[in-house]
Image: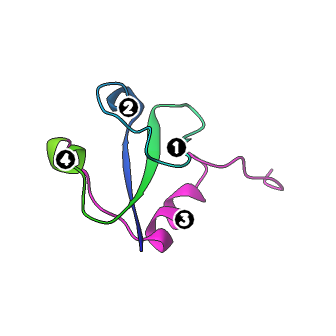
């Protein structure tokens, strides 16, 4: 089962995220959602990142900070 975390985009550089699939950034590119499977990697501990379920990550990524909302005036 996949796990997710939202971290600061600036925290992507010091860690090896090459084993991850996509890394999605917020519209202003200050935050990033990362996904992994299995045991929590060391960076989760190092960054005190909250581990999210797929549903929790999708709920967050559906907000205006992550998605261009259409139809709003």
- Tell me whether circle 4 and circle 3 mark residues in contact (CB < 8 Å): no
In the rendered structure, which disc, 3 or 2, sits on the residue that comes first in sequence?
2
Residue under label 3: 58
Disc 4 to disc 2, C-alpha distance: 13 Å
- The quadrant in which the N terminus is found is bottom left
1 and 2 marks in contact (CB < 8 Å): yes
In this rendering, the answer to whether 47 lies above or below 58 is above
Q: Are marks 3 and 2 in contact (CB under 8 Å)?
A: no
Dot 3 or dot 1, earlier in sequence: 1
What number is the disc on residue 12?
Answer: 2
Q: Which mark is residue 23?
A: 1
User: How far apart are labels 4 and 1 at the CA level?
Assistant: 17 Å
Which is closer to the viewer, label 3 or label 1?
1
Q: Can you tell which mark lies on residue 11? A: none
Give percent across and percent down for residue 56.
Answer: 44, 69
Label 4 crowd (10 A; few <14 / some 14-19 / many >=20) = few
Q: Which residue is mark 4?
A: 42
Question: Which residue is at 78% across, 54% downward?
Answer: 72
| Span colored in magenta | 47-73
Which is nearer the N-term, disc 4 or disc 2?
Answer: 2
Q: How is the image coloured?
A: rainbow
């Amino acid at each position: 089962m996949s796990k997710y975390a939202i971290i600061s985009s600036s925290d992507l550089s010091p860690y090896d995220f090459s084993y991850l699939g996509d890394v999605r950034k917020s519209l202003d590119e200050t935050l990033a959602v990362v996904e992994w499977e299995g045991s929590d990697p060391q960076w989760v501990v190092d960054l005190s990142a909250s581990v999210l379920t797929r549903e929790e990550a999708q709920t967050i990524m559906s907000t205006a900070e992550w998605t261009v909302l259409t139809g709003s005036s």
